[in-house]
Structures are given as structure tokens and as C-alpha cells.
Image (cartoon, coloured by chain):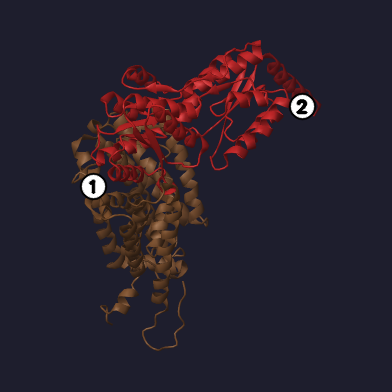
Chain colours: A red, B brown
Amino acid sequence: MKTFNILKAATVAAIVATNAMAADIAVVGGKTDDPFWNKIKLGLDHAAMFIESTGGSVTYLQLQTYDNLGPDAAQLVRTAISQGVDGIVIPNWVPEAEDEAIRAAIDAGIRVMLMNAGDLEKARELGAINYVGNNEYSAGLAAGEYYGDQGIMNVICVNTVPGAANLEARCQGVADGIATKGGVSNQLPLPATSFGDPTAVAEAIKATLLGTDTIKGVITISAGDADSAAIGIQQAGKTGDVMLASFDFNQSGLDRIKAGEQGFAVDQQPYLQSLLAVSLLNAYIEYGNNLPVAPIATGPGIVDSSNIDATLAGVQKGAR
Amino acid sequence: MNFLSLGSLLRRPEAGALLGLVAVLTFFVVFGSTRFLQPAGASSWLNVAANLGIIAFPVGLLMIAGELDISVGAMIPAGSMTVAIISGHWDQSIWLGIAAALAMGVVVGYINGTLVNRTAVPSLIVTLGTLFAMQGVILGLSVLFTGTVSVALKPEESGPIAKFLFGQFLGGTFQVIILWWLALMAIYIFYVHFSKYGNWIFAMGGDKEGARNAGIPTSRLTLILYIMSSTSCAFVGMCQAILFNSAQVSAGMTFIFNSIISVVVGGVLLTGGFGSVLGIFLGTVTFAIVTQGIYFTDFDRNWSSLIIGVMLLIAVLMNNTFRQMALTYTPKKGKRAARHG
């Protein structure tokens, strides 16, 4: 028994010792079964290689569902606190639900970096170091302006998850962006019964295009929806007449851009979000380094025919 | 026995489903436009109905037999991802991809059926388990093999024959899967309504113990139904990948609810023992019309879900009224107690 206790004490001491030497960082994030969070995972895996080489660690705390987003994320923050980490990287999806837990982490001496969802004002308010990511509204704005610059003045924003604040902000951004060029964009909210059914999404877009001849642009809130939209546009007989675009992208979307069948894709560069957020947080905890740049914007980047080849090379490696 | 009288027609299981269909069709022609019935409009709901319908048949038969299959949500992406990874990512023959996708369906269906037969766990829970398990398998393997969760399957990788069979548009607007759906319906109608197997399924749903005691091979039948269900899902997923030239890990969950709704709108009892293949067909068409018809109306799109919900309730209520008529009908003035669903 006594030996056991000594052993235990030694182990605890060893753990404390390594903790004192290097940063242990927890990253809260979404399910890796969608392309987006998979790239986030790759970014943090790459950052982890470097951090582990200095004796630290990076853990990915993953949501199991999105049904209870805010409280679940808050719970993961508390899990991280109880694990005794030195730093937490977290998206501020639902501030009302998450802020209390984030404050508790900061009060416990844990450094926090906001990533992917949130903004600089929120980071300052909570006492987080910085915000790394994209602003959904400005991503929409960039898309709207791109359409306007191409002379396309009537665009629908296809929203397969109406009501989600970040997606509504994207569509609102498109509307405001195209408005600055004199155009108009309406949202096409699809009912929950069609989410994940490519035929239902394609047919909804086809029917809308057939019903309104003046629509010259279709932008979808996700890469998968753009695959459905491409078929919908083709079925309406309007390939070439209606410019397709998407927020985020996948291989087939990029193939379409390369073939000239899709105008562009708005990229928020998820790989960079986690890579930078984790690396910067580690540097802050370890060496007291801090960037004067705030917030750190990873998007919006526009992928179109001008930069498609470099992007395709990144896709092959799972980072874009 | 007068099968042709109006009364006996109304007491058939699919009568309610047919009236529900007529009701929603009328609604959308009145509030929408007749474009809804022209080829481009009709394809809009027939395409959705065909994809859903191929899955709704076996799901409905399982429900008639008193079982549920929730794992359909994972088996659709399982089918699409298998063919996309094998034929798109690895550049193997499309036929190998198709065979592997269907084989995946058979294997998972076998697991579902065996677990339901061998354990006392309700099929809802068993298939819920395989739903999550398969989601994990697909995600894990996809990331392992391709590094991503969205895999492209280019038209040239599918090849002209596979495109022709599974992913073409007939007349430029009707998905070829509609023909598969109708052919499968004919086969189901034959087996369910004109062979002994149909009666076995109904008997199982009515009283499983009794059916087994009467010598019906209930375990084998359950196994076959689960294999058909999973394989049908893999088939639909495979067709989607070939048609849309890509596959996503996260797709398909909506088919769980939608298939059960279609089956219930089609007059199948949630508790089993009552329903028909034609009813399931009509229920699927009704569901597709309700969800797609909305785009042919001028209603504000924010209200779509409300209208869908109300229309489905109306369809099911009509159905229930007629099922009640069918189940409480007594041929003569006898004192036989009416059986209630």
C-alpha cells in the first residue's frame, strides 16, 4: 500500500513537472464528419506535432451532436478545466450558453483563444487573447460584391439550415454586398425535410429557377449543397446562364470551377484557423509572444478560375 | 363478395392514402400553378419520391411486420461513399464500386436482422446502434482512405453505362431511378399481395409469437427484410453518387424520418399488421408532393415547414378515417367485436 502511494505521488509529481514545462491545450470543435471540421482537425494535428516536440500536448474535444450546441460546448470547456489544461481554443457559437464557462476557465488561470465563431469584441469582453477566424457576414459581403462586379444582379442564397445565426449572417452579407453594386439577393430557406437529400435540394432550386427567370446567381451555404445546386441549375436548363457559387468547397466544387461550371467559392481557410489559433496560444503561454494583429482574419478568400490550381494542390493534402 | 362496389374500394388499405394524395394534389394545383403537373414540375416531386420510395418499401414492410429500421440514415451515405471511394478516389471499375456498395448493404442488413432475431432488444434500439456504428465506420474509413469526407465521382469515372443505368435524366428531367422504383414496386406487389410471403409478413406484425407457432419462419423473414432495407439504401446512395458526381459522409439522416412518415401517410399502422405496397407508394408520392409542391406556390418560403406539417397531418387524418372504416367493417349484421388499430 505504502509503495503504491509513493508510486502515485511520484506519478503526480511527474505530471505536474511536465505541465510546468510545456503547454497542454484543449481545442473544442465540431464533429469531424463534415469536410469543414476535418480540415480544422488537420490544422490542429499539424500544430500538435510541433507542440508535442516541445513536450506539450493538444487534445481535440469534439461535440457529438449539434442539437444542443451551446450547453454542450460549455460542458466541454468544463471538461477541459477539470483536465487541468493551460489553454483552451474554442468557437464562441452560442455566447449566452458558453460565456459563463469560458469566464470560469479564465478565472482558473487558463488562457483562452476564440476561434471560428465569435469576434474581437467578444474576445476582449471575456478576456480571451484574440479571435482567429472568419466573419460570416463579411464572407457574405465579399460574395455579394463578387457577383455585383460580374454584373450579376439577382441572386438567391440557398439556406438548408434556416435559422442558424452564422448561415443567416452569410445570406444577409450576400444581400448587403450585392446591394452596394445595385443588385438584390433573396434567401431561399429550405424545410428540414430536405436537409441531406440532394435530390430534394436540387429540385427545390430547379423549381425556383423555373418560377423566376430574373435569377442569375445561386449561392449555397455549404459545399455539398453546391453539388445539388449544380444539378438543379442544369435541370432548369440554365447552366451558363446562372452563376453558381458556394460558401466553402469540396473536390467536385473545385472541379466545376476549373471546368468553368461554377463561378467561385468563398473560403474561410479552416486549416489556418486551428493551425494559427493553437500555435499562437501555445506561443503566448510558453514564451509570452503575442501578435499585435487583432482579430486574425483567415477569410474570406475567394477561389475562382484565377487561383484554382494552387487550391486543388492543397485539397489533395486534405488541408483545403 | 363484391370487390367493385364503392364501399369495398373505400375499405381497401390504400383508399385513404389515395384520397390524401388527391387532396394535396388539388391543394397545390389550386394554390400553385399547373406547371406543377407538367414534365419539369412533375419530375420535381417524382425524383424525390423515387429516391425515398425505394427505401420506403422495405421500411414499410418491416413496419407491417412489426419492426423498425433507423439505420437507413447511415446506409445511404454508406452506399454513396463506398462507390465514390472505390471508383472515384481509387479509380477502380465502377462495377466493383457498385458491387461493394450493395454488398455493404447486405452485410449491415444481415447484422441488423441477426441482432433483432438473436437478442430481445427492440429493433428501434438495435438499428439505432447500427446507425451510429455505421456513421462511425464510414467517417473513419473515409478519412483514413481519402483524407476528406466529401469524395468526387466524375462522370468519366462512372462511365457511360453506369450513368445510363443509374444516373441519367430521362427526357432531360426525370431521374432514371424512377424506373427502378416502379420496377421494384411491381416485384413487391407480387411478393406481398400475391404470394404466401405477404401473408406471413402481415401475420408477423399482427402476432409474432402466433405466427412462429403457426410455422412461419419469422426469423428468416425478418433477416430478409432487413437485408432488403439496407441494400435498398445502399442502392439509392450509389445512384445519388453517380448522379450528383459526388458523395458526402453526412448526408442521408433526413431519410429516416421521411421514410417512416411516407409509410404512415401511406396507411401502414405504426404498430404493424396493416398496410399495403400500393399504399406506401401513394404515401411516398404524397410526401414528395407536399415537400416539393411548396416551390410552385407563392407562399413565403419561411412558412414551408408549417405547410408541410399541416398537409401531412391532413393526409394522415384522412387515412385514419378510412382505415377505421376498413377495420370496423362487418360484412353482415353479426355481433362480432370490431378490431381497433
Label tally: 2
The answer for which chain carries disc 1 is B
Q: Is residue B187 above or below residue A47?
A: below
Residue B161 placement, left or right of A77:
left
Is any atom of residue A224 visible in this view? no
Q: Position of residue A103 (x, y in %)?
A: 69, 29
- Residue beneath label 2, please? A4
Q: Given the current orientation, which residue lies at the most extreme right position?
A: A2
Asked where in the image residue B156 lies, by quadrant, the reply is top left
The answer for which chain carries disc 2 is A
Is any atom of residue A62 visible in this view? yes
What's the CA distance linking mark 2 and mark 1?
Answer: 70 Å
Q: Are marks 2 and 1 in contact (CB under 8 Å)?
A: no
- Residue beneath label 1, please? B176
Mark 2 is surrounded, within 10 Å at the Cα level, by few (under 14), some (14 to 19) or many (20 or more) other residues, namely few
Query: Amino acid type of disc 1?
Result: Val
Closer to the camera in the image, B157 or A185: A185
Residue A302 placement, left or right of A27:
left
Q: Which mark is residue B226?
A: none
Residue A229 placement, left or right of B70:
left
Mark 1 is surrounded, within 10 Å at the Cα level, by few (under 14), some (14 to 19) or many (20 or more) other residues, namely many
Q: Is residue A198 above or below residue B60?
A: above
Q: Given the current orientation, which residue lies at the most extreme front position?
A: A182
Q: Is residue A14 above or below residue B143?
A: above
Q: Nearer the viewer, mark 2 or mark 1?
A: 1
